[in-house]
DNA sequence: CTGTTAGCGCTTTCAT
DNA sequence: ATGAAAGCGCTAACAG
């Protein structure tokens, strides 16, 4: 190990050139594996690179080239299985192309989203993949104009030309409601996220439509839309289960709500049917297993990457939207019948 | 939205200066909030910045300054709750200092670790936080010499001067074994990860020592060390539970093994005590709840960040190692008594 | 095949 | 308080 006490500047291409006795540009050629360098010089340069432990300075390269080889990903939370899958897929693709991945977390806060995005675009990522929350992403417009490819996932962007990969929210909710109705449920509650969130909105609208389709009344005490918190869900569950005409089944509009609902339900003895929109990582290990509308995070991620790679060469093409189908995974919690 | 069809270069500081009728340097001063700019010029410059939608080019800045304001994080998987917590904590810290976070995933493959790290160091991150796997990280030495702060988490680095944040693996295993012995178990199996992994090694050694301390024989058919796979665990569980003198309790050396074991156990009717080293995100929702040796990912992350910030100003100080305590979280699976 | 020159967009240094 | 010049480390464009 060459670690020693003294601070040491990193060697530059110039120093490599000096040591190898060649011109700067020859080193550049070797480093970038450009053709037209004789084997002898190549060897000399490589030796010098090894001797000096030279590694190219990407900042300089980026500045000169105009391309940074960087993909920015802006999501709510890194631990959410959906976004974790997205991150994995993008990371894998990035590495395969020699790019790196910057990750920013918004925690569903529009101001943070803006801050993070502005911090990122200063670094001129080639592409930005995000799950937008804010009303508008128009602050990205100059960068989109300058060629940055933006692809959104889970929700569409506003104020910029971007591609979007969305889940079939309405279809998923339809399946959930149909499934519960088929089990004999008529009083089906819907607990979703804050209506300001695009997916939350699409899903609750679909829920109401599906109930109407089945000619079932929606008890407004059975519809709750808020950011899920442990305390909030406790209160919500009381309203849903302890009132007159209590719900016999619950649809959770997102997996964070599902987690809190499961925790809240753990303290009760009534068996309530439950269908979750979006799966939990270990949904199969729960008893009963979690019946869930499953979004294929992987398919969505791949789709996003594909749209991005297609957009990269022609950044000014019109935005496309792809809807990815979802499917109902039946594991037990959604098959609990209503009490007689 | 200013999005239009034509590709558009991003404005540079020079153009802002021209538009504001000032020198380049004055714009630089305003952008960097340096003192000694008259209010009038400041206003003019800010107006020009707004008119042009100017955002500074971080690549150029980095090149000039030598500091990149970038933190690199290299971990196995983004979805693992332990690493997700780490990522969250580092991201939060990074944003608070105006840095950004690059994330690389190794999937526990030493070659990928090396590739990812080399890709990253080319971008000259100010600090690198990693959970190392490979035998040695000496390929980072030139960059450590040049002032990059390296802090490892979960496992120590080799071949470079770095700080390390490690869990008290032996203490955790001691607690697990003691707990199971107290429930009356004598045939306790240990299923861990590949012994090449530092934590796996520390933990299995501690398991043997703890068993010895209790004067319990270790049945070698009850000790399995391998990367957890669904098929592998099936075979392992047969060996552990279907042989003569079957184990009555299992300690899982890491949470991925735990997941697979839980899946494998789901198909069996015997009730086996189970203690997991490292928690699952929804360990409290399982029935029985998962009894686990809990590492405080958050404490470890904070510690890593602290070590990093301390190392940043004096990158050549000797490496420190901090052991973070773990604790046993009792939720049911570890309290199943042995069959009579 | 190899080298020279210019300059990416910014900050640093030094004048004014 | 403001500005001009130099140059960070590299690659693009050209010349030999």
Image (cartoon, coloured by chain):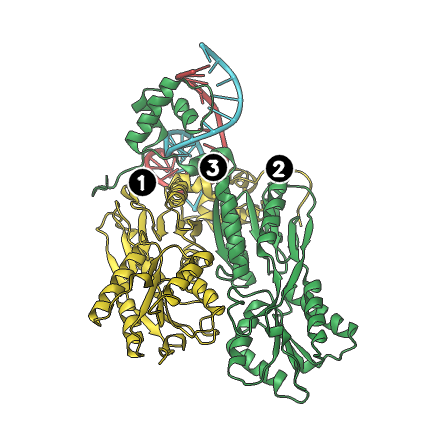
Chain colours: A green, B yellow, C red, D cyan
Give the total number of marks visible in the rendering: 3
Q: Residues within 10 Å of mark 2 (few under 14, many from 20)?
A: few
Residue for badge 1: B139
Residue for badge 2: A313
The image shows residue B167 at horizontal and vertical percentages of 30, 63
At x 30%, y 59%, the residue is B165
Label 2: element kind: loop
Relative to residue A269, is residue A176 depicted above or below?
above
Residue for badge 3: A62
- Chain that bears disc 1: B
At x 46%, y 48%, the residue is B30
The image shows residue A36 at horizontal and vertical percentages of 46, 19
Drawn side of residue A114 relative to residue C12, left or right? right
Drawn side of residue A29 relative to residue B147, left or right? right
Q: Are marks 3 and 1 on the same chain?
A: no
Which residue is more in the foreground, A315 or B24?
A: A315
Label 1: element kind: helix
Q: Are marks 2 and 3 on the same chain?
A: yes
Drawn side of residue A256 relative to residue A135, left or right? left
The image shows residue B149 at horizontal and vertical percentages of 31, 49
The mark found on residue B171 in the picture is: none
Q: Which circle, 2 or 1, is nearer the viewer? A: 1
Q: Residues within 10 Å of mark 1 (few under 14, many from 20)?
A: some
Quadrant of the image occupied by residue B83:
bottom left
Which of the marked residues, 2 or 3, is nearer the chain's N terminus?
3
- Chain that bears disc 3: A
Quadrant of the image occupied by residue A32:
top left
Quadrant position of the C terminus of chain B in the picture: bottom left
Q: Residue furthest front?
A: B244
Which residue is more in the foreground, B8 or B321?
A: B321
Quadrant of the image occupied by residue B250:
bottom left
Cα separation between marks 3 and 1: 23 Å
């Amino acid at each position: 190990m060459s670690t020693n006490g003294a601070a040491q500047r990193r060697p530059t291409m110039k120093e490599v050139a000096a040591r190898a006795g060649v011109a700067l540009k020859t080193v550049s050629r070797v480093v970038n594996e450009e053709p037209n360098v004789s084997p002898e010089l190549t060897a000399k340069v490589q030796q010098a690179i090894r001797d000096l432990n030279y590694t190219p300075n990407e900042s300089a390269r980026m500045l000169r080239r105009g391309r940074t080889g960087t993909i920015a990903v802006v999501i709510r939370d890194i631990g959410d299985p959906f976004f974790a899958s997205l991150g994995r897929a993008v990371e894998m693709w990035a590495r395969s192309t020699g790019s790196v991945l910057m990750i920013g977390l918004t925690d569903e806060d529009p101001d943070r989203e803006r801050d993070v995005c502005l911090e990122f675009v200063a670094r001129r990522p080639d592409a930005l993949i995000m799950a937008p929350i804010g009303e508008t992403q128009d602050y990205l417009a100059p960068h989109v104009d300058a060629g940055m490819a933006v692809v959104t996932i889970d929700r569409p962007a506003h104020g910029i030309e971007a591609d979007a990969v969305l889940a079939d929210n309405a279809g998923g909710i339809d399946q959930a409601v149909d499934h519960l109705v088929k089990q004999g449920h008529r009083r089906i509650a819907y607990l979703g996220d804050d209506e300001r969130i695009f997916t939350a909105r699409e899903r609750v609208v679909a829920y109401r439509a599906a109930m109407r389709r089945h000619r079932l009344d929606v008890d407004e005490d059975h519809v709750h839309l808020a950011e899920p918190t442990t305390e909030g869900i406790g209160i919500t569950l009381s309203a849903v289960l302890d009132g007159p005409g209590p719900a016999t089944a619950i649809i959770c509009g997102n997996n964070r709500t599902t987690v809190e609902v499961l925790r809240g339900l753990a303290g009760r003895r009534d068996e309530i049917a439950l269908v979750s929109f979006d799966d939990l990582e270990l949904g199969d290990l729960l008893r009963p297993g979690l019946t869930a509308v499953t979004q294929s995070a992987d398919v969505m991620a791949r789709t996003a990457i594909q749209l991005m790679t297609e957009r990269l060469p022609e950044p000014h093409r019109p935005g496309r939207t792809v809807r990815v189908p979802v499917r109902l995974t039946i594991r037990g919690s959604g098959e609990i019948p209503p009490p007689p």
